[in-house]
Image (cartoon, rainbow, N blue to C red):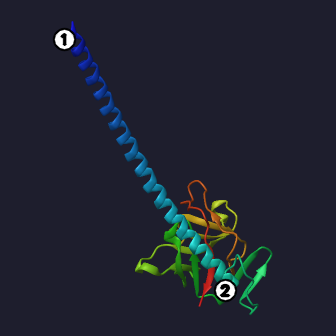
Amino acid sequence: LHLQELQALRGHLDALTRAGQQQRAELGAERHALDQEARALDHQQSDLDEQLAELAQLRASAASGGRWCCCSRPERNGEIDVAGDHTIARVSAVNVVRVKGAGSHEVNGSYVKTQDSSGDTYFLKREGGVGGKALYFNDGQNYGLPPAWYIADNHRGLGIYVCSHDQEETLPFAGWDIYDVEDFSNPGLMPPPLLQVES
């Protein structure tokens, strides 16, 4: 009888040991998942810190008299004008436009004024040595859309960001938004970009 009790006790201890090992394995898996989540959060925090630093630089630039559209009013020199909520520039007076701060980072960069074979003026991204991203005006008549400026995959391509504006002769720096229209867009990410005349 004593031997049977010892065997039963040993079986109980073995069962407890197995349960403890199983709990340790489950806790290890949970810890691994939590570590992965912590790394992902650290990465997101790093991205957020980078974006906040960029925003602080933009604010500092605006406070020091920079020509950022959303924060400061530039000196009136006949090339840039303020109309309502929009800061605009005459296309004829601008050669290079800087797009900055867009959530879709691939659109950020310098855009140089150019013309296509039909004489349409637009701005083409020059960085990276690869053609592609373009900033252009479209009156929207052929597509049943309102007139606007677009930042797109290419000239006359799918819009990524849009700014409603009815004048091809002037380029708006503020009021940009994500362009999300079925069949005509490749929607960008928040936030929309800021535009600046680049000298």
Outermost residue on the right side: it is: 84
- The foreground one among 143 and 26 is 26
Left or right of residue 98, residue 173 in this image? right
Outermost residue on the bottom side: it is: 77
Quarter that holds the N terminus: top left
Residue identified by numbered label 1: 3
User: Distance between the Cα atoms at labels 2 and 1?
Assistant: 90 Å
Residue 194 in the image: state x and y as whole percent: 63, 74
Residue identified by numbered label 2: 66
Residue 13 in the image: state x and y as whole percent: 28, 23
User: In the rendered image, which quarter is residue 97 located in?
Assistant: bottom right
Point 33% across, 31% down: residue: 20
Residue 158 in the image: state x and y as whole percent: 54, 64
User: In the rendered image, which quarter is residue 198 located in?
Assistant: bottom right
Element at badge 1?
A: helix
Outermost residue on the front side: it is: 2
Q: Amino acid at mark 1?
A: Leu
Outermost residue on the top side: it is: 1
